[in-house]
Image (cartoon, rainbow, N blue to C red):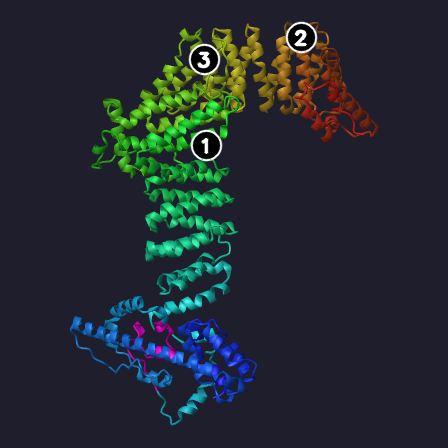
């Protein structure tokens, strides 16, 4: 037998079976050739064999035992002793193998006996089962003919056979189990596959050809069993276990050759094999392949992998999930691709229900905490937050409560809006549910957040951190549904809430729209039907039986509401953001707890503090509270919760009273303005606000009428042009002819805002005529206050006003006002007017101004203004001189170039360099004159 025949014999089909880590054909073939050519020694061959496991050594037996005589070289003779030792070791292992095989045969005999005894039915044997200890070198064809399986035994006893095999697996080392048997020996063993219930017979031809001729003839069929794949193809799995073994061997080779976009198709195969494969090492490899299946899995691919992980977890139980799946997550927690880390974060949440409870609150919680603190990808942290929410729904270790609260604060303060949104939608409701079970919602969670808000207000007297205020207040707002559910579940009537008969319907608008299903009160309670019954009893209890003994509701009334109202009084009323945040909080609180609660518990507490009556006009205490944020928050957060006619009347009356009291007491109007701004953002309240302002227009007090005129300025920007034309302009025209000059002056800002926001030509002409009457009527010639208000308004609305209005009205009248101011003999008034003119010209200098307008009005106005500033404010005069020189030079340059048509002198005047310097220095006029002199200097 030559070397080629030895290496290429059928015994080499077992290389892949035993998973040898030594050279395979043709590498081994070359090794033996080197041996024959004296290039390697027998020791090299022994070293190859000694590097493998015992069960792998027997695969070398056919090679070492069948070395051809031609290999008896001097080098081989020198090493024959070593080869002999190796053969002795293999012989010893073979003996142990036969002993184990005999044990298997005895166990199978016992199984047959137990089966016959159990079923008490005769067994018909079609043939005799061959002994397991027949020679492994017997011709495969003969063994195939002699090995006939008892079909009735295997058909009836399939399950018992499998369970017994599992039992053997647990007692016999896996390296000695039939997985390492040579192929021919395994062919002689009984199979539990249903496909082998009967012997397969093939028709033989009625020919007299010799077997050798047949064999030679069939050799022309091109088949390959020399490679790994050929070896797998040449063997058909004959049991469930062998199928799993085959898949475990083949899948690692299949996966790399599948397109990335189609690899998710392999997930079922990988998972099924990982579930059922008997070898832990192979299972670990398969799960590693699963988590590394796709380089950067997209959302759909991750969902598929997660679905598979959950199916795996349901099948194998918590112990294997902890031992096999979690290590895969841990390995990729710091993977360079965010998609992989995203898969880890999502897996922690998806696997939470299937993990041991100790692992949920220790390892998994720690993994998620690490990712929340360290991961830089917003999407990953968002997934972490959602998984933390799921963990909070399954955790039952009270010692982890404080850790959960710290994670909650970290999540609420995350810089990513996605993470914060996920916190409100998932993490916070789940944590609140656990907090409620522990009895900490009213005793710790809500009070702690309130205390943090109060601390912020105390520390923020000179600058409130509005971001943190929003963080804590939005968290409180998200806790309102959980708080209301707690009140219902601990009510005196909770034991009476039984579902029977017709269930009352819940109004669609009864509750504010929840941010997520977890903030839906019906979800927290359990069902919409159960909630409907509880709400019916809740309203009846409040209206007829009161709150005696209702501890959870009394806490809301006696502790939560007073603390909230006290906090409201401390916030800055001019902070639109703070007012809006608290307004939305009270609106949601009142809508959630219902109309009866709002009318009987919330409104009385606000009314007690505000004390709206004319008796308090001269009272410093009464006036003080009306100037605080309590007014706009009560108006917009409490009085707007319900929109029936009586509710609207109450809101109108409240605003009218506030406007009257603030006006008559000469108090700041900031609280009233904040109310108008917040309500004006919603078009549904525009008619209501106009009704309030008309009350002020026709009021007997000029102070109230003046306040009404100033409030129109706030309302105009959000009101549609139809209402402006029908309601606003007529009211302003009425006020502009008021006997009191202060009232007429108060209408000017509102007229200016109309010019800035309205595009209807007729409406603009009406406003223009009214402003012209203020400027051209002789009775207003010496009205310093009126001129000041007009100049301020022109400077504010001029840049945004309709260009024709600006060119034909604003700039020419500013020129006239500058001329008149040169004649003012009172220096204080002259300086005041000049300062406002300077600000107006500064704003208008950035607008498109034609050359004619620049020469006839803009430059002359600047020169008049410079005359005033020369005597009254040298700092301003330096800037004006530079502006005038620059403007004159641009006009001269354009004249030399003979431009066609009109042009923008201002566009060239305020080139990027000049414009930037000018705008940056306007508010810094307190600096020295020498510094200001350099603002408009031409670069050398």
Q: CA distance from mark 3 to mark 1?
A: 29 Å
Ranked by sequence position, the earlier of labels 3 and 1 is: 1
Which residue is the site of mark 3? 624
Residue 552, x across and y down, in percent = 29, 28
375 on left or right of 780: left
Instruction: Check the image and name the residue furthest to the bottom.
Output: 208
Are the two marked residues, 2 and 1, in contact with CB atoms closer than 8 angstroms?
no
593 on left or right of 616: left
Tell me the quarter of the picture where residue 794 sits: top right
Residue 583, x across and y down, in percent = 43, 25
Which residue is the site of mark 2? 828
Q: Is residue 292 above or below residue 176?
A: above
Secondary element type, mark 2: helix
Ranked by sequence position, the earlier of labels 2 and 1 is: 1
Residue 164, x across and y down, in percent = 26, 69
332 on left or right of 321: right
> Which quadrant holds the C terminus?
top right
Magenta part of the protein: which range?
A: 176-203
Residue closest to the eye, 79 or 615: 79
Secondary element type, mark 1: helix
Which residue is the site of mark 1? 471
User: Measuring 37% from the left and 67% from the top, which residue is drawn there?
Assistant: 244
Q: Is residue 301 above or below residue 242?
A: above
């Amino acid at each position: 037998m030559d070397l080629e025949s030895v290496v290429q014999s059928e015994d080499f089909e077992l290389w892949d079976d035993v998973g040898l880590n030594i050279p395979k054909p043709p590498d081994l073939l070359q090794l033996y050739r080197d041996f024959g050519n004296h290039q390697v020694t027998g020791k090299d061959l022994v070293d190859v064999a000694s590097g493998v496991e015992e069960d792998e050594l027997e695969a070398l037996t056919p090679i070492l035992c069948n070395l051809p005589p031609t290999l008896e070289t001097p080098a081989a003779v020198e090493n024959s002793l070593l080869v002999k030792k190796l053969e002795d070791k293999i012989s010893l292992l073979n003996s142990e193998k036969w002993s184990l095989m005999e044990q298997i045969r005895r166990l199978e005999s016992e199984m047959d006996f137990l089966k016959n005894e159990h079923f008490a039915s005769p067994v018909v044997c079609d043939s005799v089962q061959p002994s397991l200890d027949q020679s492994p070198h017997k011709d495969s064809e003969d063994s195939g003919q002699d090995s006939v399986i008892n079909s009735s035994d295997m058909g009836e006893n399939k399950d018992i056979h499998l369970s017994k095999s599992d039992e053997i697996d647990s007692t016999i080392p896996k390296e000695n189990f039939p997985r390492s048997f040579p192929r021919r020996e395994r062919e002689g063993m009984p199979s539990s596959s249903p496909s082998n219930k009967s012997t397969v017979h093939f028709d033989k031809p009625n020919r007299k050809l010799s077997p050798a001729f047949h064999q030679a003839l069939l050799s022309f069929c091109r088949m390959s069993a020399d490679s790994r794949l050929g070896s797998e193809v040449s063997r058909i799995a004959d049991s469930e276990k062998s199928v799993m073994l085959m898949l475990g061997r083949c899948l690692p080779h299949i996966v790399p050759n599948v397109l990335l976009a189609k690899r998710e198709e392999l997930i079922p195969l990988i998972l099924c094999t990982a579930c059922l494969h008997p070898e832990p090492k192979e299972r670990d490899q398969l799960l590693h392949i699963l988590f590394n299946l796709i380089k950067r899995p997209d959302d759909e691919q991750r969902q598929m992998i997660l679905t598979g992980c959950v199916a795996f977890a349901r099948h194998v139980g918590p112990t294997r999930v902890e031992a096999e799946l979690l290590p895969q997550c841990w390995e990729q927690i710091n993977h360079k691709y965010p998609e992989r880390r995203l898969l880890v974060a999502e897996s922690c949440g998806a696997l939470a229900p299937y993990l041991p409870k100790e692992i949920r609150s220790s390892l998994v919680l720690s993994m998620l905490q690490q990712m929340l603190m360290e991961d830089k990808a917003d999407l990953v942290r968002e997934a972490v937050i959602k998984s933390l929410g799921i963990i909070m729904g399954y955790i039952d270790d009270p010692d982890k409560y404080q850790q959960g609260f710290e994670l909650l604060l970290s999540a609420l303060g995350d810089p990513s809006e996605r993470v914060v949104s996920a916190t409100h939608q998932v993490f916070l409701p789940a944590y609140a549910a656990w907090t409620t079970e522990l009895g900490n919602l009213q005793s710790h969670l809500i009070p702690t957040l309130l205390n943090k808000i109060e601390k912020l207000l105390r520390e923020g007297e000179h600058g409130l951190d509005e971001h943190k205020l929003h963080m804590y207040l939005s968290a409180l707002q998200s806790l309102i549904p959980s708080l209301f559910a707690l009140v219902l579940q601990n009510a005196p009537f909770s034991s009476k809430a039984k579902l029977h008969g017709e269930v009352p319907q819940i109004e669609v608008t009864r509750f504010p729209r929840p941010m997520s299903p977890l903030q839906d009160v019906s979800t927290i309670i359990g069902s919409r039907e159960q909630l409907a019954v509880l709400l019916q009893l809740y309203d009846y209890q409040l209206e007829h039986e009161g709150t005696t003994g209702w501890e959870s509701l009394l806490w809301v009334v006696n502790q939560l509401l007073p603390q909230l109202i006290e906090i409201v009084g401390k916030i800055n009323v001019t902070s639109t953001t703070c007012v809006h945040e608290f307004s939305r909080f009270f609106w949601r609180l009142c809508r959630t707890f219902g109309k009866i609660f709002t009318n009987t518990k919330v409104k009385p507490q606000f009314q007690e503090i505000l004390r709206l009556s004319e008796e308090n006009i001269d009272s410093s205490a009464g006036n003080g509270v009306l100037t605080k944020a309590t007014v706009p928050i009560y108006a917009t957060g409490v009085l707007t919760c319900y929109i029936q006619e009586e509710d609207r009347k109450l809101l109108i009356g409240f605003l009218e009273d506030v406007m009257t009291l603030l006006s008559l007491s000469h108090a700041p109007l900031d609280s009233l303005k904040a109310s108008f701004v917040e309500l004006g953002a919603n078009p549904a309240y525009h008619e209501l606000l106009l009704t309030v302002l008309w009350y002020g227009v026709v009021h007997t007090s000029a102070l109230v009428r003046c306040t009404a005129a100033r409030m129109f300025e706030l309302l105009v920007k959000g009101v549609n042009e139809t209402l402006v034309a029908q309601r606003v302009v007529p009211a302003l025209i009425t006020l502009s002819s008021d006997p009191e000059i202060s009232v007429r002056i108060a209408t000017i800002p509102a007229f200016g805002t109309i010019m800035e926001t309205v595009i209807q030509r007729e409406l603009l002409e009406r406003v223009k005529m009214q402003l012209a009457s203020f400027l051209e009527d002789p009775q207003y010639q010496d009205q310093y206050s009126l001129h000041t208000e007009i100049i301020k308004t022109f400077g504010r609305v001029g840049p945004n006003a309709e260009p024709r209005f600006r060119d034909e009205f604003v700039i020419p009248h500013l020129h006239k006002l500058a001329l008149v101011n040169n004649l003012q003999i009172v220096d204080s008034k002259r300086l005041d007017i000049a300062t406002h003119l300077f600000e107006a010209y500064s704003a208008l200098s950035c607008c498109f101004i034609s050359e004619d307008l620049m020469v006839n009005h803009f430059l002359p106005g600047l020169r008049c203004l410079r005359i005033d500033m020369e005597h009254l404010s040298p700092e301003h005069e330096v800037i004006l001189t530079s502006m005038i020189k620059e403007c004159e030079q641009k006009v001269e340059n354009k004249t030399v170039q003979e431009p066609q048509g009109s042009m923008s002198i201002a566009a060239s005047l305020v080139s990027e360099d000049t414009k930037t310097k000018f705008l940056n220095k306007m508010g810094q006029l307190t600096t020295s004159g020498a510094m200001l002199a350099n603002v408009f200097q031409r670069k050398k």
